[in-house]
Image (spheres, rainbow, N blue to C red):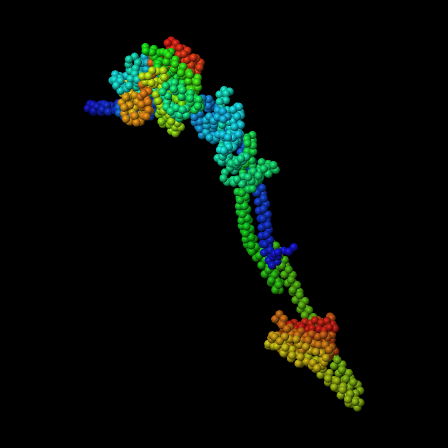
């Protein structure tokens, strides 16, 4: 009996001494995201070392992310515990209970450390649904060499001035099409339309939160877009171009102006080829008709946040890694994008390493949100379709917007 | 014809060796020349065949290159990006794409035009001031694909111009260029395996091993000889072939292929030297083998036969060989053996005949001597018989004392004569002993003349001609004095008054020669061989033994005595001791 008791005790001791199976969370991340994938992997590994919680990053294309998340949410045990959330999906995912709201402790931290223009991007129905992670938005990029050949020395201060400069460049034969942008029939087209509406003093959402794309600013925005094409100032190839190609065009020196996300500053700075021209990034100007006193600039938010799946079995671990990844310390080491934490902005090192920080800060003041809507996908698709038709000359701008508004209101495409 | 070298002094073996060497050398020379000619012609034919292949390869390479350029041009011009970027003015992006195409497709220049005068994008190679290029560019904007050679400040290029179209609208023209430089030449040379010279109206492209003067010479030679010899000609130490660049502007563009024959000529020379050395080695070996073979076979047998023949020459007729050889030397030796057998029989017979002849001669001589003695004796005997008969038949003392004394005196005189004959015969028959001693010929002759009754031969001059410095000879002075005396007496007896007898002496080939000459009656023909026989005489008086004794004395000295006589003109007796 004594021997048996000893053996039993020994077996129990062995079982207790075995390491507990490490907790593992799955993290859906986007390949085109601003941070290098290797940095994310490294962050996950250091997190594991510190906490014993294993993080398995899954990198997917932007276009695949939405469907993967929808499929994952339908499962009893979701494929992903932590996910990178595009702000446009916030309302939909919250309504469908695909994600959990941010814990109160983290909300307080966000409100304290992040400017409202950024933190409020993931608010819906009075709650915060993701930790702001990527603060991305568009800037105006100007080829100073072409600008000089066109007879100007500094970037435009209004949209009209930009058009004037483009006309002059075209007239002088500096470049056939002075402006290039990403006006392909994709989400980016809505982004462009959004900031242009903002540049004319409006928004795609009215005071009641209703989608309004037939307002005067919206109509002026689309008319302005069409006029650029009609006057040969905007390269028609923009209608087939996404942000990446537009960036390539600007990098190649084939256009005078373009608007693009922040990553283009990094691309231009990191370009291995000796840059054939000098360039400058500046806040996107607004129409001269906008009264003074405002920010004087307009851009569109392209934020990404870290959200936790509602059905995740590892929510505490997921939020813990989200907080670890989305830390001022991590962001201060990666300044390709705009750090979301205000404390990072104030650091001397940040100002030294990011020459465009002040421009970005100014641009943040003029950020415009795309509509926050539970059926944003439908809204976006309608807007893309009718805006593109107007740009392609198949329908008049106002009519296109009316058609879009009608369909959005009817909840159909 | 004069033969410069006549190897008359050479032995047969030497002559044969010399003949062999000359023959082999001549044959080698002929073979060498023939082989050189054949190899040279074969080599030339081979090089021409190689050149034909090279020209085909150049043709193929050009066709392939043209097709390749055309395809590449159409491929790049048809790329959606090329079309879009050209259409939407994205020149830098297009240039970037063209750089990628240029590097990946191995093209030297890629340029896009959006108008005949408007370069839109691209890399190097634009011929901005070239009329040919402009003309072709204009055609390309009309929709045709151009392929041509153009020369400009930047060099010569092979161009393909392909329109860039969207639907039927020509947006621009893509110019795709391949630089015709030394790299291209080197590329063709690697493919073709011969040296290449690209000849254009304004320039030539080639590697540094071909000088400009050589280029001019090749072009001149080709222009002169191609009409006669076709596409492949010979120029200097090279085989030259050419391929025209048809349908390309400017006209006259041509690619020459050069195959160097110097190397093969050197190779042939090397083969010749090797062949010559081998021939000499073989010849030396053949000579050495021949000499060894000759020494071991022919020469040894020849020496054996020569030795046998020398035995035969020495009178040994016993068959000397009796060899087992089966070859020609064996046959020769057998023939000699046979001949020796026959000679031995003949010699035996000859000796027998000689002995018989000797006996006959002795008997004949004895007969002659007997006849002579009988003749010498008969006359006195006749006188003695008549005198005795007269005394027997009526002689009276009264009738005459004088007659009686006369008759008896006759008998006594004849008896004395008979006594002299008998003494002479005995003296002739008595064996003589030769006692030699150094003797002066002059004193010998003088002494001989002193013993003669020269006063009896009045009117006949006796002359001597003996050199002062004549050496002394070992002779029996008394006997030889007698011999000379007998010859001079014989000459005096044959001479008439008013003539002369001359005695000459000299040294001839180490021997003593004494000539006794007279200009008397001479010796009758047919009797010369008889004059040395004892008791032979043509005169009424004398014993007929003088010449026989002289002959015998000379022979006993080991010498000879010869006579040369012409009837009516005189005789010369010559003693050689």
Instruction: Locate residue A335: give its quadrant.
Output: top left
Instruction: Locate residue A245: give its quadrant.
Output: top left
- Could you tell whether B397 is left or right of B10 in the image? right
Q: Position of residue B553 (x, y in %)?
A: 65, 75
Foreground residue among B365 and A136: A136
Q: Residue at x 73, y 84 (%)?
A: B413
Foreground residue among B354 and A36: A36
Q: Residue at x 40, y 20 (%)?
A: A164
Q: Measured along the vertical axis of the image, is residue A122 above or below residue A251?
A: above
Q: Position of residue B131 (x, y in %)?
A: 53, 30
Q: Residue at x 55, y 33 (%)?
A: B253
Which image quarter is the C terminus of chain A in? top left
* Residue lying farthest to the bottom in this orientation: B398
Q: Is residue A21 visible?
A: no
* Residue lying farthest to the front in this orientation: A151
Q: Measured along the vertical axis of the image, is residue A277 above or below residue A367?
A: below
Question: How many marks are shown on the rendered structure?
Answer: 0
Q: Measured along the vertical axis of the image, is residue B203 above or below residue A239?
A: below
Q: Position of residue A143 (x, y in %)?
A: 39, 24
Instruction: Locate residue A302: give its quadrant.
Output: top left
């Amino acid at each position: 009996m004594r021997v048996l008791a000893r053996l039993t005790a020994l077996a129990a001791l062995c079982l207790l001494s075995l390491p507990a199976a490490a907790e593992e969370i799955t993290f859906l991340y986007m390949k085109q995201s601003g941070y290098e994938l290797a940095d994310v992997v490294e962050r996950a590994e250091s997190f594991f070392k510190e906490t014993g919680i294993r993080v398995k990053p899954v990198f997917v294309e932007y276009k695949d992310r939405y469907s993967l998340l929808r499929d994952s949410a339908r499962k009893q045990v979701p494929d992903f515990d932590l996910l990178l959330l595009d702000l446009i999906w916030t309302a939909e995912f919250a309504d469908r209970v695909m994600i959990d709201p941010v814990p109160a402790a983290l909300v307080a931290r966000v409100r304290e450390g992040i400017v409202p223009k950024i933190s409020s991007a993931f608010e819906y129905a009075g709650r915060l649904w993701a930790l702001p992670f990527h603060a991305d938005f568009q800037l105006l990029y100007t080829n100073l060499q072409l600008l000089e050949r066109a007879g100007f020395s500094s970037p435009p201060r209004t949209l009209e001035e930009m058009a004037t400069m483009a006309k002059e460049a075209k007239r002088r034969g500096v470049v056939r099409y002075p402006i290039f942008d990403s006006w392909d029939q994709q989400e980016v087209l809505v982004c462009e339309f959004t900031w242009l509406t903002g540049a004319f003093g409006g928004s795609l959402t009215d005071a009641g939160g209703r989608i309004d794309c037939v307002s005067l600013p919206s109509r002026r925005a689309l008319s302005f877009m069409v006029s650029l094409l009609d006057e040969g100032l905007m390269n028609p190839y923009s209608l087939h171009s996404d942000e990446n190609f537009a960036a390539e065009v600007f990098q190649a020196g084939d256009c005078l102006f373009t608007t693009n996300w922040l990553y283009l500053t990094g691309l231009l700075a990191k370009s291995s080829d000796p840059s054939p021209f000098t360039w400058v990034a500046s806040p996107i100007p607004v129409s001269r008709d906008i009264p003074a006193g405002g920010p004087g600039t307009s851009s569109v938010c392209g934020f990404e946040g870290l959200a936790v799946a509602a059905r995740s079995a590892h929510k505490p671990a997921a939020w813990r890694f989200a907080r670890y990844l989305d830390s001022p310390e991590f962001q201060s080491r990666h300044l390709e994008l705009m750090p979301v934490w205000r404390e990072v902005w104030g650091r001397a090192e940040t100002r030294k390493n990011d020459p465009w920080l002040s421009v970005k800060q100014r641009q943040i003041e003029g950020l415009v949100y795309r509509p926050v809507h539970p059926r944003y996908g439908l809204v976006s698709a309608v807007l893309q379709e009718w805006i593109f038709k107007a740009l392609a000359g198949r329908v008049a701008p106002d009519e296109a917007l009316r058609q879009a508004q009608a369909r959005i209101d009817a909840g159909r495409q | 014809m004069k033969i410069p070298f006549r190897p008359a002094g050479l032995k047969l073996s030497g002559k044969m060796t010399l003949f062999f060497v000359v023959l082999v050398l001549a044959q080698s020379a002929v073979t060498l020349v023939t082989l050189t000619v054949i190899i040279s012609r074969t080599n030339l034919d081979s090089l021409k065949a190689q050149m034909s292949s090279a020209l085909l390869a150049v043709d193929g390479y050009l066709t392939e290159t043209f097709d390749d350029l055309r395809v590449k041009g159409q491929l790049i011009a048809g790329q959606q990006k090329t079309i879009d970027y050209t259409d939407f003015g994205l020149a830098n992006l297009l240039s970037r794409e063209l750089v990628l195409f240029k590097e990946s497709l191995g093209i030297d220049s890629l340029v896009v035009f959006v108008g005949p005068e408007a370069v839109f994008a691209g890399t190097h190679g634009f011929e901005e001031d070239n009329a040919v290029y402009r003309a072709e560019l204009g055609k390309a904007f009309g929709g045709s694909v151009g392929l041509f050679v153009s020369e400009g400040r930047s060099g010569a290029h092979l161009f393909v111009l392909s329109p860039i179209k969207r639907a039927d609208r020509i947006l621009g023209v893509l110019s795709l260029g391949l630089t015709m430089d030394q790299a291209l030449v080197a590329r063709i040379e690697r493919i073709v395996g011969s040296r290449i010279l690209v000849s254009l109206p304004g320039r030539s492209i080639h590697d540094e091993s071909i000088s400009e003067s050589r280029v001019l010479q090749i072009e001149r030679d080709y222009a002169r000889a191609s009409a006669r010899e076709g596409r492949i000609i010979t120029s200097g130490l090279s085989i030259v072939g050419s391929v025209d660049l048809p349908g390309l502007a400017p006209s006259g563009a041509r690619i020459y292929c050069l195959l160097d024959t110097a190397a093969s000529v050197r190779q042939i020379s090397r083969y010749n030297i090797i062949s010559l050395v081998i021939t000499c080695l073989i010849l030396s070996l053949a000579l050495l083998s021949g000499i060894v073979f000759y020494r071991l076979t022919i020469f040894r047998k020849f020496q054996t036969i020569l030795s046998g023949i020398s035995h035969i020459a020495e009178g040994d007729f016993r068959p000397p060989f009796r060899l087992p050889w089966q070859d020609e030397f064996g046959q020769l030796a057998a023939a000699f053996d046979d001949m020796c057998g026959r000679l031995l029989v003949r010699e035996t017979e000859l000796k027998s005949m000689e002995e018989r002849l000797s006996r006959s001669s002795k008997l004949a001589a004895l007969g002659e001597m007997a006849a002579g003695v009988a003749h010498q004796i008969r006359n006195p005997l006749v006188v003695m018989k008549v005198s005795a008969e007269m005394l027997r038949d009526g002689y009276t003392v009264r009738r005459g004392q004088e007659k009686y004394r006369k008759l008896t005196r006759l008998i006594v005189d004849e008896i004395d004569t008979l006594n002299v004959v008998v003494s002479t015969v005995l003296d002739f028959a008595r064996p003589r002993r030769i006692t030699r001693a150094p003797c002066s010929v002059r004193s010998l002759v003088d002494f001989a003349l002193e013993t003669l009754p020269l006063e009896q031969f009045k009117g006949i001059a006796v002359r001597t001609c003996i050199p002062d410095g004549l050496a002394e000879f070992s002779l029996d002075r008394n006997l030889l004095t007698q011999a000379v005396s007998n010859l001079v007496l014989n000459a005096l007896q044959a001479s008439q008054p008013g003539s002369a007898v001359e005695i000459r002496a000299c040294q001839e080939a180490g021997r003593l020669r004494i000539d006794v000459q007279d200009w008397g009656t001479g010796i009758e023909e047919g009797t010369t061989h008889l004059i040395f026989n004892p008791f032979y005489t043509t005169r009424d008086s004398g014993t007929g033994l003088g010449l026989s004794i002289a002959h015998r004395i000379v022979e006993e000295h080991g010498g000879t005595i010869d006579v040369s006589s012409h009837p009516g003109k005189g005789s010369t007796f010559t003693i050689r001791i």
